[in-house]
Image (cartoon, helix red, strand yellow):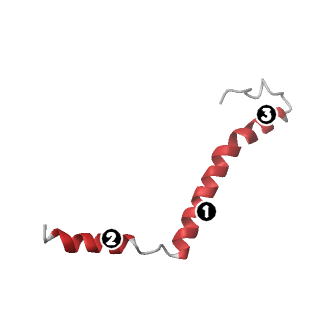
Amino acid sequence: PAAAQPQRLRLSAAMSEKPSPFTLALVAGGVAGTSVDVSLHPLDTLRTRLQSQEGFWKSGGFKG
């Protein structure tokens, strides 16, 4: 148990370090971009099919 003590201290010290502003911005941008694409892509697909010259059903309707 005494040998595990320094390792625990090293792990807790490493976890307490704050991420750099670049890393934080990179992760935040990735999460924001992914959430926008996941939520708005289906709506954009429906809008495109509704505006199609062929009409909604001939351009694919609700099918992928």
Of callouts 1 and 2, the N-terminal one:
2
Q: Amino acid at mark 1?
A: Gly
| Count of picture labels | 3
Corner quadrant of residue 49 = top right
Quadrant, the N terminus: bottom left
Q: Nearest the camera: 7 or 58?
A: 7
Q: Residue at x 58, y 69 (%)?
A: 25
Where residue 3 appears, x then y in whole percent?
13, 71
**Marking on residue 29:** 1
Secondary structure beneath dot 2 equals helix
Residue that carries the numbered disc 2 in the rendered image: 12
Q: Nearest the camera: 5 or 54?
A: 5
Q: Residue at x 86, y 32 (%)?
A: 53
Q: Nearer the viewer, mark 2 or mark 3?
A: 2
Secondary structure beneath dot 3 equals helix
Q: Residue at x 74, y 39 (%)?
A: 43
Q: Nearest the camera: 53 or 48?
A: 48
Q: Amino acid at mark 3?
A: Arg
Where residue 63 appears, x then y in whole percent?
67, 27
Residue that carries the numbered disc 3 in the rendered image: 49
